[in-house]
Image (cartoon, rainbow, N blue to C red):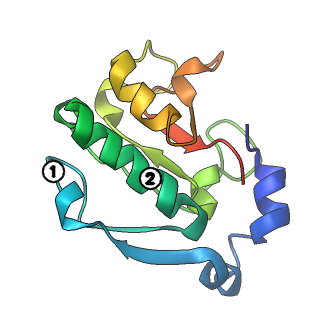
Amino acid sequence: MVNPAQALAKYGDPTIAANEGKYMVLVNVPTHLQVGKIPKRIYLNKDLQAPLMKAFDNLVRTGCVRELKSWDGCFNVRKQRGAASQSLHSWGIAVDVNAAENPLGAIPKLSYGFVRCFLDAGFDWGGNWTRKDGMHFQLKTI
């Protein structure tokens, strides 16, 4: 599982705008993947692009896309909730979905099929953690 120290070592300090410009890109989601709540454009880390498009493809192909009720973001420079270190969202290598139904600490309400679409594309899921974060998916490796 990727941690903030690894992200900092690879991408640099996310609070420095020049570093952000080295790894972040604005991606137009392919038209065939713009289904339901999948956004049309996403500002994300270039390393997240291929795995996220694969996860979207998996969602569409399996029909699990119907479970996507909200896209709650990717890039957001901020600290982890309740911690001193930066969130992986600070480097654009994590996404949140269906946040209202999957708050931090609650039992996740995503189906196994939905979660599998992300896991098979190279993500870790916060719903598997001791402190559940069912809305959260992050790159498994960088």
Q: Is residue 114 left or right of residue 16?
A: left
Residue 4: x %, y % from top left = 76, 50
Q: Which residue is mark 2?
A: 52
How far apart, in angstroms, are the residues tagged by discs 1 and 2? 14 Å
Q: Which residue is mark 1?
A: 35
Q: Is residue 110 visible?
A: no
Give, as a three-letter code, the residue at label 2: Leu
Q: Is residue 114 above or below residue 91?
A: above
Q: Secondary structure at mark 2?
A: helix
Which part of the image, by quadrant, shows the C terminus? bottom right
From the top left corner, tell me how far across and down residue 107 is, in percent: 44, 12
Which of 16/117 is in front?
117
Q: Which residue appears at 78% of the width and 71% of the height?
A: 12
Determine the image quadrant of residue 17.
bottom right
Which residue is depicted at the point 63% across and 20% down? 129
Direction from residue 62 to residue 51 in the image, left or right: right
Instruction: Find residue 33 and report its image quarter.
Output: bottom left
